[in-house]
């Protein structure tokens, strides 16, 4: 009788929970995951399906008379015939690989210098982290003015020590423009690695350094056999996140050069953006985006497996 009264007066959610867990199943856990699954489906799965669908159709917004015909793999075939795609692919690889390596090296040096017990060291840490919090548009236009061929303060400083960057400037030189954009990205993004690596260094017990020194290990041996193995998980996560961001985000190049001069700084993400929002060809832009997604996912899988094999 008491069970009947309790069941009748218990909240509907409690009754549902008892029903879902009565047979020892995990249905209740799946029920609680429904909001998260719906969010993932709305933010990730649905846009991905729509992107793949657009890549299989001709969708030109300023040509409504064309309709939306199904063209199959025509957009992907067009990519192999597009001469800009080769340049964009090569620049993307250089931009991501060199960018991540340089950011990691500078970030590691900054983290090692900041991992010291000094008075007011927090001031230096704050100053080092400031570029990461600076909006990309502010960093881009600030550096564009600093390297201006006529008025830029960096241009004048380089000229004072005998380095001539030419009358057209770095960003207007097809041979230097990509490296100029990478330098700006390096200045703005190396604090990302510095923050991760500094947190990892501070998590290493100081007793390990004392023990290694008592065993006769020098600084390099301490770093190689103690510090680096402990930092490897952080290095793995930070490098893959930054590589994905550089491959998928054309913001800095868009603001500095917009892919020029010519196509010397063109990258895949920027080319897809231009096809969609300047030429309104969303079908071809979606095909480029899907190809870039496959490349990024493939890189991530290979990188994860290589790291797992190294750990084993």
Image: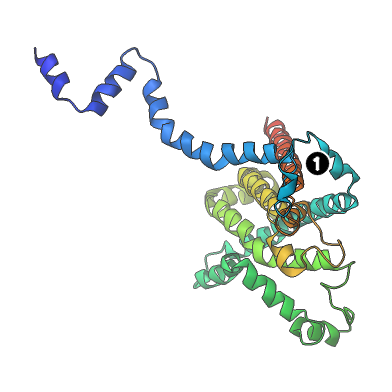
The picture places residue 189, in percent across and down from the top left corner, at 65, 62
Along the line of sight, the residue nearer the viewer: 60 or 33: 60
Q: Is residue 242 above or below residue 263?
A: above
**Residue 216 location (% of width, % of height):** 67, 49
Q: Is residue 287 above or below residue 192?
A: above
Quarter of image, res 16: top left
Which of the pair 228/273 is nearer the observer? 273
Quick check: 181 above or below 22? Answer: below
Outermost residue on the left side: it is 1
If the image is split into quadrants, where does the N terminus sit? top left
In this picture, residue 258 sits left or right of residue 228: right
The residue that mark 1 highlights is: 75
Q: Is residue 221 visible?
A: no
Residue 239 rendering spot, x and y as whole percentages? 67, 49
Question: Can residue 172 be seen in the rendering of this structure?
Answer: yes
Given residues 231 and 139, the one toward you in this image is 139
Which residue is pictured at 65% across the width and 71% down the height? Answer: 139
Q: Quadrant of residue 100?
A: bottom right
Q: Residue at x 76, y 41 (%)?
A: 291
Whether residue 211 sits left or right of residue 101 in the image: it is left
């Amino acid at each position: 009788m008491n069970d009947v009264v309790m069941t009748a007066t218990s909240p509907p959610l409690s009754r549902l929970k008892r029903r879902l867990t009565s047979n020892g199943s995990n249905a209740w856990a799946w029920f609680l995951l429904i909001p998260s699954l719906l969010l993932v489906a709305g933010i990730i799965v649905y846009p991905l399906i729509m992107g793949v669908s657009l890549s299989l159709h001709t969708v030109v917004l300023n040509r409504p008379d064309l309709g939306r015909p199904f063209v199959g793999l025509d957009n992907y075939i067009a990519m192999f015939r597009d001469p800009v795609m080769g340049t964009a692919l090569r620049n993307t690889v250089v931009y991501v690989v060199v960018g991540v390596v340089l950011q990691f090296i500078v970030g590691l040096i900054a983290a090692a210098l900041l991992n010291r017990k000094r008075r007011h060291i927090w001031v230096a840490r704050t100053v080092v982290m400031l570029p990461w919090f600076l909006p990309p548009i502010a960093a881009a236009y600030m550096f564009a003015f600093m390297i201006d061929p006529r008025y830029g303060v960096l241009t004048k400083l380089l000229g004072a020590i005998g380095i001539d960057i030419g009358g057209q400037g770095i960003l207007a030189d097809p041979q230097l423009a990509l490296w100029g954009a990478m330098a700006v990205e390096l200045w703005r993004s190396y604090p990302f690695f510095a923050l991760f690596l500094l947190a990892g260094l501070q998590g290493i017990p100081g007793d390990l350094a004392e023990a290694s020194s008592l065993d006769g290990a020098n600084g390099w041996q301490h770093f190689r056999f103690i510090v680096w193995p402990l930092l490897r998980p952080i290095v793995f996560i930070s490098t893959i996140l930054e590589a994905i961001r550089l491959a998928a985000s054309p913001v800095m190049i868009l603001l500095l050069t917009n892919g020029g001069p010519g196509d010397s700084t063109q990258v895949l993400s920027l080319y897809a953006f231009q096809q969609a929002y300047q030429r309104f060809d969303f079908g071809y832009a979606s095909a480029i985006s899907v190809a870039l997604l496959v490349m990024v996912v493939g890189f991530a899988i290979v990188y994860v497996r290589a790291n797992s094999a190294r750990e084993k």
